[in-house]
Amino acid sequence: MLNNSGWLHAITAPPTNPQPLTPNPLTPVLTIDGPSGSGKGTIARRVATALGFHLLDSGALYRLVALAGSQQGVAADDQPGHARVARELEVQFGMDGAGEERILLAGTDVTRAIRTETAGAEASRVAAMPPVRSALLSRQHAFAQPPGLVADGRDMGTVVFPGSPLKIYLTASPDERALRRHKQLKDKGLTVTIAGLSQEIRERDLRDSSRPVAPLRPAEDAVILDSTGLTIEQVVDQVLALARSRLPAIS
Ligand code: C5P
């Protein structure tokens, strides 16, 4: 069971109140975009914890839409069907008593199920559907709550929170990204080969950066951070230093 007191953020959908079409301009939002395996997820989580901010893992939303769509028998190419799934997604993000991430889809724990490479590839397929992206927009905006938000994804700085005062584009060499993903998945008990992962990462990068809607690319005013050869702590320190200089409410 989830430990309510440890929740980072919890939402149930569909929302009962209309959500704002734009995020609350008074809430500072720090965006972290980049390709898969760049370390965004880990860095975003650590930075959010250090700042006491909420966290939006937007990739998890696309993974959940793909999973819920296949569970509901929605055809792979059915865009309105997947958009309906995205609107009705009943999801809760939280942590268990041991501080481990837990994601519930309609009350069922899908934390592991959505983290596989197959789930990532399926997410990237539904993420290329414009109606799905529109359907998830207000849900993502709703995460921008005081005291602030760290938003992790592909289009956080370019599309979802274009007014963000600090946009980071985190990247790393393809080899390093494959090695990191390999370690991450192995730690989660999932078996994958580095060669298979490299191939998977290349295909996903290509699909994410070449799609016509919200392609993966740095915002014009993004700070590009190459984390190749850097430790997690070094990257977190760089992001926190930038946050302190760019976000007025943080010192
Ligand atoms: O970040 P993660 O690997 O969980 O994302 C899974 C997929 O979801 C990505 O490959 C991408 O296609 C899609 N995605 C997206 N926009 C985001 C976050 C993720 O298109 N903001």
Image (spheres, helix red, strand yellow):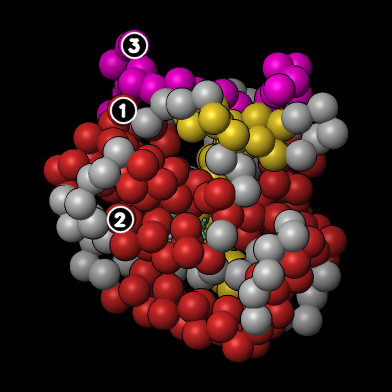
Residue 145: in sight, yes or no? no
149 or 77, nearer to the observer:
77
Type of the residue with mark 1: Glu
* Residue at 32% across, 66% down: 215
Residue named by callout 2: 126
Query: Which numbered tag is attached to residue 88?
Result: 1
User: Which quadrant would residue 230 be assigned to in this image?
Assistant: bottom right
User: Does 8 lie within the magenta span?
Assistant: yes
Tell me if mark 2 has few (under 14), some (14-19) or many (20+) residues whose alpha carbon lies within 10 angstroms of its own.
many
Task: Tell me the distance, in whole angstroms, between the alpha carbons under discs 3 and 1.
Answer: 11 Å
Q: Distance of mark 1 from mark 2, alpha carbons?
A: 15 Å
**Residue stretch rendered in magenta on the structure:** 1-26
Task: Tell me if residue 176 comes above or below residue 250 in the rendering.
Answer: below
Magenta residues, dominant SS class: loop
| Image label count | 3
From the top left corner, tell me how far across and down residue 118 is, in percent. Answer: 47, 64
Badge 3: residue crowd in 10 Å (few <14, some 14–19, many ≥20): few
User: Which residue position holds label 3?
Assistant: 16
In the visual, does 170 lie left or right of 202?
Answer: right
151 or 105: nearer the eye? Answer: 105
Where residue 53 appears, as percent x and y from the top left, is 67, 33
Q: Does the residue labelled 3 lie within 8 Å of ligand 1?
A: no
Residue at the farthest top position: 16
Report, in whole angstroms, how far the alpha carbon at label 3 lies from the one at label 2.
25 Å
Where does the image place residue 181, in percent across and percent down from the top left? Answer: 66, 70
Q: Which amino acid does label 3 sit on?
A: Thr
Sooner in the amino-acid sequence: mark 1 or mark 2: 1
